Image (spheres, coloured by chain):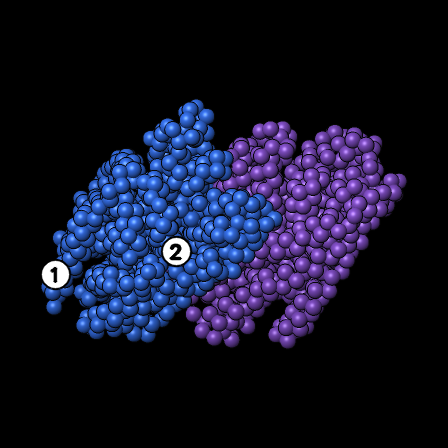
Chain colours: A blue, B purple
């Protein structure tokens, strides 16, 4: 039995990669014959590769330093695992970018033939990313575990993945929003250009940004939560149920089952011949969820650990609740968006206040969902004679197991977004562009739901890691009445606020430079506004790239150093409080920012669709300001906080045993 | 010895009231002979009284219900104490309002003779409020303690004060900002009217708002922190050092000493003949701080409890650090404000993002200050053989003891702000108005510092209350690894976010109504814009009043019910986590909002002073949007959060013993 399971896990991972390969071969056969559109796509490819290369150089240095530290402090096994994690995560991000920047022109070309032809190209291009991520993760984790036989070593793999994710997510977020804001503020507001107008020097950078932020960044982010959750359960299983192999293997098996469920979900998407891309995506996600729940039931039966079934489902349900909440608060048909748009009639100030408030309110149902999942997972586990800590960790894996499908739906977004750019650049007719628009709208909804999902998943994952940390450093209790823990709680709570501030300031500074550069080009390059000359897009790409990487240094270093400083000075109790504080505040900030940003975005769209006078009115101008404020909320700071709290938890756990020995005060 | 102390405390309170009475007699002799200005002042008086009456009606209902609940659940002693607290706090607020709305025209009249004549009127009018607050608090607490002999009964007094404070602060905040935003959005932006232009129908409501928000609201808020901190230390002294009377009396003695120090500080202000009102106020505060530190040293010697000296000073220093931080982040001469103003050149979006980020960054030094004070207080106490819990609580009292002076400087702000309005309304010449402007500028700085002070004080106070709660319900440890505590932490953390959302939405809705009413008046009342006819100010006052009280219900009820629900369902462990979560997130939100709001306000002023093109430019318009966004941050949500977390801690502590017995799940 054991060897079957042992074989089943990596083989499913391999199957995932093989299927992704088939999708790639199919995608490769699709063509675009619009040279202008291909040229546009080519520029995005070049920009993306430039950025990714330089990001990987930065990662190479960071990972090099960390590998040396790990090698010196924790031994070569963890160092190898760390490198493997960084490489797997990096490869998945690279593959996703490679595909998405090639699929865009093909989708645009296919859009001539309508939604039914174009949609599958976008979706299956995204699915290549989705399947690569989960496949690589599963293969990497299982092989490292089989070689070293200790899940604590696999934690190094997780840390490697997180290191990349932090750089990819925060860096990508700074990149994409500097370009986006710059392009909008000058192009749209000052010169009345449309989105994706090729005369705008920052258009290429903006489209590159969609890929580096939403494909590479989001992919790396979910990869990182996925791996961290699985490893957390493995370690808890290992520590709490030593010898009982099913508790260690359960999360890996769930991962494998999740891959199968995702593939079944993809089949549903393929054979569902609806004209509505959004409903296709949702059908795929729902089908995957149901398949997964059914398969999990049989897995629990077979492994004879029925007690973990409900914790798994609790996580899955929490994911659905958080996704729905994001949808409710950011949906163009619902009260929050329309109420916020209505306030635009008095100018930008009340619109911003309303969006800000609804963003904060959206924390309520999501946090209740997380608390509910936590409580159900804990008590149903305990009721079945299983450790509550293990139950909560399993909930995180339950939620993340359908990652394959989630990432597919998410990566679809920037692909069709870019496709629209390709169609505009290629001078396609209005009907084709309308098809692209419809594909894009579905992508935006998918993106909002995925963002909620990513935050919820990160929340449950860091809770699992928190337990792993406590077990690793031997904290049987973590007493809030201990002043060290209380101080830690405050310091940790401060981190998401400071991190958000640094990343948003980074976007603001970089966007300011971008604005000046675009203004300069329109002033100095004669004939640019008339469309006679091409803009110097490369210069804008360079500003975005250089700025993103430079601005990444301070928040990046802070994330790694802060837990080390707290741990090695105030001790493991204070660090426990620190992690707890960062988790609570981090989740609140992440939810609030993601949803407020999405809400402002759609309030703008609601007005553009004709409400309160539509485009060109004062209300619309106000809504554009709100949308711009929301940009770094939803695409830079908000989603990076997930990774921040995961990285800090991993640093604490990996270096915890050393802190126990060498902390200065040890409160 | 004991009876001398017992006498000393209430007698100092009485002395405080008597001195306030002398100030009032002196103030009464000051006159204004400008009838138009007096008329303006009269309208503000009427508006303020209308609002306060209706607020007290609302309070009467709320307090009635709570009194009955307390009577039924906890006995008549606590019920009486509760009522006494509400009445004392209400009286202080009423007295402050009464004075401030009468002093404004007098200051405006005196401004004809220059700053040196006008400044003392503003300051000593504020001092009446400051001395009344601390005097009433000290008399109330000591008498209730002498009668019942149990500081737990005095906790009822504190709860009464907090109930009023929550309504006064949040209600006042909603009132003042609905009026302010409404007046600005239509008057300034659409019709190009100046601040305090009498043609603007919302000008009276705006000026009333300054009084109800900043005099009555802020006064009640600090009264509430002050009482809560003193009672917390009394209870801890009572529980931890049963029989040792000096530990119970120490905070009361500190309060009395603080009154004496504040009076000495006021003397310094009186005899300091500087032309700069800001430097006069600061000199008073610094002198009070130094006098207080010296007196405290002797008190500790005399009472033979030298070990509490450093904890007291730690709190005082933390207060100074937080005050300075607020100043640094909101000062017009410093980088954050100027950097934010610079971003206005690209429009409102980057300005808002920058202010938002700097607001978040301002959390860093303040939280470090709070953590430092906590650690120093704890460990210096423990080093001297005193309980660390007691030490941290003492730090809160140390910080709050100079409240007399702090409130004086704070109440000065709205008085001179109103004075400017009176001068404008009275048609005073430019020189007089310039004097009022200068008085007002000093008031704004004082206000920023006080706000930081109020938040820091609330932070340390709720930490003290947290210890009292834990002692009262018998939580020797509060284990974060208990899932109930973790769930509580999340739920508590959510509260400040939800509360902020509700109060800001309230402002937004109410301001929206105000905007429509002002637009209606300008459209329908012929000759209004030409200054021939008076506006219907009463209608605007009514919108602000009715709206504020109606919008208060949901967040108000939530604050009282949430801790009861958590405590009676999930139990006292979960409620402990709930309080901890609300404190950490609450302090972060309060600091961030207060400082971001102050920063945007001054960024606007910086541009109005001529930077980046000055008034009328696009940059200025952008800065006005930022200022409006910041209004409810700094004057509604931000400062109300203090009171929210204090009220929730008090509810938890008072009903804690019942929860121990009757909680449903008791996780």
How far apart are the alpha carbons under marks 1 and 2?
Answer: 38 Å
Residue sitting at x 66%, y 62%: B550
Quadrant location of residue B7? bottom right
Would you say B305 lies left or right of A462 here? right
Q: Chain of mark 1?
A: A
**Any part of residue A40 in sight:** yes
x, y percent for residue B36? 85, 42
Mark 2: secondary structure = helix
Q: Front-most of B515 and A525?
A: A525
* Mark 1 or mark 2, whichever is nearer to me: 2
Name the mark on residue A445. 2
Mark 1: secondary structure = helix
Q: Chain of mark 2?
A: A
Would you say B101 lies left or right of B617 here? right
Q: Front-most of A48 and A431?
A: A431
Binning the other alpha carbons within 10 Å of mark 1 as few (below 14), some (14 to 19) or many (20 upward) gives: few
x, y percent for residue A174? 39, 40
x, y percent for residue A546? 35, 32
Identify whether A18 is placed above or below A71.
Answer: below
Identify whether A607 is placed above or below B614.
Answer: below
Reading the image, the residue beneath label 1 is A7
Would you say A100 lies left or right of B233 here? left
Say whether marks 1 and 2 touch (CB < 8 Å): no
Residue sitting at x 61%, y 48%: A346
x, y percent for residue B435? 76, 32
The mark that comes first in sequence, 1 or 2, is: 1
The N terminus of chain A lies in quadrant: bottom left
């Amino acid at each position: 039995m054991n060897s079957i399971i042992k074989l089943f896990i990596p083989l499913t991972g391999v199957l995932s990669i093989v299927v992704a390969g088939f999708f790639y071969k199919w995608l490769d056969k699709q063509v675009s014959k619009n040279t202008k559109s291909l040229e546009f796509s080519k520029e995005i490819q070049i920009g993306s590769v430039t950025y990714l290369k330089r990001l990987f150089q930065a990662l190479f240095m960071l990972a090099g330093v960390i590998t040396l530290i790990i090698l010196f402090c924790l031994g070569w096994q963890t160092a190898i695992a760390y490198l493997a994690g960084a490489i797997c995560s990096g490869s998945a991000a690279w593959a996703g970018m490679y595909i998405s920047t090639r699929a865009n022109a093909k989708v645009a070309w296919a859009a001539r033939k309508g939604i039914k032809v174009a949609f599958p190209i976008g979706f299956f291009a995204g699915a290549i990313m989705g399947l690569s991520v989960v496949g690589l993760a599963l293969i990497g984790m299982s092989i490292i575990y089989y070689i070293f036989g200790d899940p604590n070593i696999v934690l190094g793999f997780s840390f490697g993945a997180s290191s990349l994710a932090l750089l990819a997510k925060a860096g990508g977020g700074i990149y994409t929003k500097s370009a986006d804001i710059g392009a909008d503020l000058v192009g749209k507001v000052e010169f009345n250009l449309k989105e994706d107008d090729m005369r705008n020097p920052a258009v290429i950078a903006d489209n590159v940004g969609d890929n580096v932020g939403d494909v590479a960044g989001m992919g790396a982010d979910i990869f990182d939560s996925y791996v961290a959750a699985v490893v957390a359960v493995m370690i808890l299983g290992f520590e709490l149920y030593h010898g009982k192999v099913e508790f260690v293997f359960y999360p890996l098996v769930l991962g494998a089952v999740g891959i199968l469920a995702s593939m079944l979900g993809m089949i549903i998407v393929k054979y569902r011949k609806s004209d509505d891309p959004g409903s296709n995506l949702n059908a795929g996600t729902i089908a995957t969820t149901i398949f997964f729940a059914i398969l999990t039931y049989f897995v629990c039966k077979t492994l004879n650990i029925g007690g973990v079934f409900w914790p798994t489902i609790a996580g899955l349900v929490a994911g659905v609740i958080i996704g729905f909440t994001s949808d409710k608060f950011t949906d163009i048909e619902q009260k929050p968006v329309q109420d916020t748009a209505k306030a635009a009639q008095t100018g930008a100030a009340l619109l911003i206040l309303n969006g800000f408030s609804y963003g904060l309110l959206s924390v309520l149902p999501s946090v209740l969902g997380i608390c509910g999942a936590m409580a159900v997972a804990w008590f149903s586990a305990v009721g079945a004679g299983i450790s509550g800590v293990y139950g909560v960790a399993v909930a995180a894996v339950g939620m993340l197991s359908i990652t394959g499908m989630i990432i597919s739906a998410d990566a679809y977004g920037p692909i069709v977004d870019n496709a629209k750019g390709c169609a505009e650049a290629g001078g396609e007719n209005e009907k084709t562009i309308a098809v692209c628009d419809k594909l894009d709208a579905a992508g935006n909804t998918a993106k909002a739901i995925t963002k909620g999902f990513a935050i919820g998943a990160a929340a449950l994952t860091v809770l699992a890691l928190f337990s792993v940390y406590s077990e690793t450093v031997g904290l049987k209790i973590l007493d809030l009445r201990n002043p060290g823990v209380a101080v830690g709680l405050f310091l940790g709570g401060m981190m998401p606020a400071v991190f958000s501030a640094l990343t948003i300031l980074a976007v603001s500074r970089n966007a300011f430079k971008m604005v000046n550069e675009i203004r300069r080009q329109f002033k100095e390059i004669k004939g640019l506004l008339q469309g006679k000359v091409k803009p110097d897009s490369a210069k804008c790409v360079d500003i975005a790239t250089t700025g993103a990487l430079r601005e990444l240094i301070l928040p990046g270093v802070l994330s790694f150093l802060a837990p080390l400083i707290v741990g090695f000075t105030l001790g493991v109790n204070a660090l426990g409080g620190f992690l707890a504080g960062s988790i609570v505040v981090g989740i609140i900030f992440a939810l609030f920012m993601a949803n407020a940003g999405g809400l402002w975005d759609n309030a703008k769209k609601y007005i553009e669709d004709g409400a309160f006078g539509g485009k060109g009115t004062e209300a619309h101008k106000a809504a554009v300001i709100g949308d711009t404020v929301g940009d770094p909320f939803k695409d830079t700071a908000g989603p990076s906080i997930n990774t921040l709290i995961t990285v800090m938890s991993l640093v604490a756990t990996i270096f915890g045993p050393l802190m126990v020995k060498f902390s200065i005060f040890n409160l």
